[in-house]
Image (cartoon, rainbow, N blue to C red):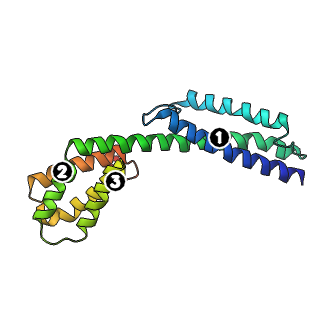
Amino acid sequence: MRDITAVGAEAAWLLLAGFAVVGSMVVLADGRLRWYPTGFLHWFMVIGVAQGPYGLLLASGLIPQAETPTVRMAMLPLWLVGTGYAVWVGRRAVFGIWADRQLAYILGDLNVLPRVTALHRRADGVDGREGRLDEARTALQRRRGRRALASLDRVLEQLEPHHSANDEWSELRSRVSTLTTNFVPGSRAHRESTAA
């Protein structure tokens, strides 16, 4: 019973610590690519520092000592793995916020939305493009660049039958594909580029 209590207490504190780590990384980064480990040495330092709070929680009794030696031996590695995962999540959050801001600026600087909207108005039919353009407009207003980029990419894809021979469409399609490859690692364009 004491083992279950100890593991439960550790899990609860680990969850709180994880939220604190992610929140701190996002706040300290302030939309820039910083405050996260970039190499093996940095990750090693994070894992080393993570033992400090765990030791304090054990010493204060906030995390009870487990009775079984096996459970006691497993608790520290569990804490370290959980902390490492929190830092990884924080790193992704920092990159996501940075990517959104950069893309919102780049898309605005290139006037992508007005240019895609002009192509849309010259094409026959609607095919749900108006809704995608509204999504992109709202996303740009909220500085959610990746969402805006995805919506614009789908509109350009729907416009292909109408403008495939159009230089403006070809240029926009190329720019959007490049931005998707560079800023959205899980995208189809990124996977195709990696495979090539």
Q: Is residue 44 left or right of residue 39?
A: right
Ranked by sequence position, the earlier of labels 1 and 2 is 1
Cα separation, mark 3 vs mark 2, equals: 18 Å
Name the image quarter holding residue 96. top left
Ranked by sequence position, the earlier of labels 3 and 2 is 3
- Which residue matches tag 2? 172
Ranked by sequence position, the earlier of labels 1 and 3 is 1
| Circle 1: element type | helix
- The disc placed on residue 3 is none
Asked whether the viewer can see residue 189, the reply is no
Kindly identify the amino acid type of the residue bearing the numbered disc 1. Thr
Where residue 100 appears, x then y in whole percent? 37, 45
- The disc placed on residue 83 is 1
Pointers 1 and 3 in contact (C-beta within 8 Å): no
In the image, 67 versus 129, the foreground residue is 129
Kindly identify the amino acid type of the residue bearing the numbered disc 3. Ala
Where residue 60 appears, x then y in whole percent? 84, 35
Kindly identify the amino acid type of the residue bearing the numbered disc 2. Leu
> Dividing the image into 4 quarters, which one contains the N terminus?
bottom right
Mark 3 is surrounded, within 10 Å at the Cα level, by few (under 14), some (14 to 19) or many (20 or more) other residues, namely some
What residue sits 36% from the left and 50% below the top? 142
- Which residue matches tag 3? 139
Cα separation, mark 1 vs mark 2, equals: 42 Å
Closer mark to the observer between disc 3 and disc 2 = 3
In the figure, 39 relative to 67: above or below? above
Q: Is residue 167 left or right of residue 179?
A: left
| Circle 2: element type | helix
